[in-house]
Image (cartoon, coloured by chain):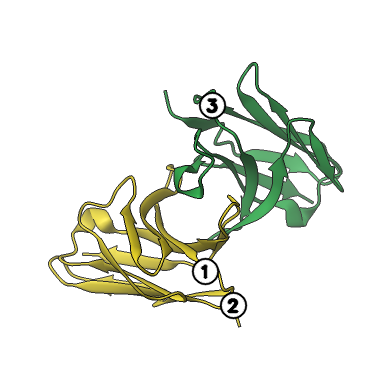
Chain colours: A yellow, B green
Amino acid sequence: DADVTQTPRNRITKTGKRIMLECSQTKGHDRMYWYRQDPGLGLRLIYYSFDVKDINKGEISDGYSVSRQAQAKFSLSLESAIPNQTALYFCATSLPGTNVLTFGAGSRLTVL
Amino acid sequence: RKEVEQDPGPFNVPEGATVAFNCTYSNSASQSFFWYRQDCRKEPKLLMSVYSSGNEDGRFTAQLNRASQYISLLIRDSKLSDSATYLCVVNGASGSARQLTFGSGTQLTVLP
């Protein structure tokens, strides 16, 4: 089994729908992140969490929200999806004191 | 100017060739530098960290030039399996993973 698991792997939805992307990890890392990747752009940080009670906005948090349900689980929600949120979304984890990220396999979201 | 800039390529090289990528960064206070590898439609995976003194891992050599604010990746004796996109990653002055900035990647194709 993968260390960082994302579900769903692929999702097509319509404008205005609520979408949740889920991430779970077995690495025991405290720190979790959500990134999005668009063609021709680097990965951009949406939200991050350094422990269960800690939630922080990243570079591009508008239109997104997150929930850290447990050390191992970090979910990303799009309350009302719009087409420019079509992207590849990655969850990642890291240990405190290190900048090395372990990524999930990604969730490809298409908003029509 | 982008915080982290990479030549997008594509670089098409024959098997056995030596190929080098450069990446420039704008924040002179950056502390940590990395190269990640991303296969098509897959998640990024750490290839190697980049240390001030330069470092080597098999056929891969990474170097840091703080004065000119760039890092480089050299791949010797290219293999077909080296075909991927190589992401340059730089962190901010805080040294925290939440300040990692990703380049948009350099695409490499190794041809038989």
Find the distance from the CA under tag 3 to the CA under tag 2. Answer: 35 Å
Residue situated furthest left in the rendering: A16
- Residue B45 in the figure: left or right of residue A106: right
Residue A88: give x, y in percent of width and height.
Answer: 40, 60
Quadrant (top left, top right, bottom left, bottom right) of the C terminus of chain A: bottom left
Q: Residue at x 58, y 36 (%)?
A: B9
Q: Residue at x 30, y 59 (%)?
A: A86
Q: Nearer the viewer, mark 1 or mark 3?
A: 3
Quadrant (top left, top right, bottom left, bottom right) of the N terminus of chain A: bottom right
Q: Looking at the picture, do discs 1 and 3 lie on one chain?
A: no
The disc placed on residue A2 is 2
- The residue identified by callout 1 is A105
Residue B67: give x, y in percent of width and height.
Answer: 65, 16
> Identity of the amino acid at label 1?
Ala
Q: Secondary structure at mark 1?
A: loop
Q: Secondary structure at mark 3?
A: loop
Q: Secondary structure at mark 2?
A: loop
> Identity of the amino acid at label 2?
Ala
User: Decide: marks 2, 1 in contact (CB < 8 A)?
Assistant: yes
User: First in sequence: mark 2 or mark 1?
Assistant: 2
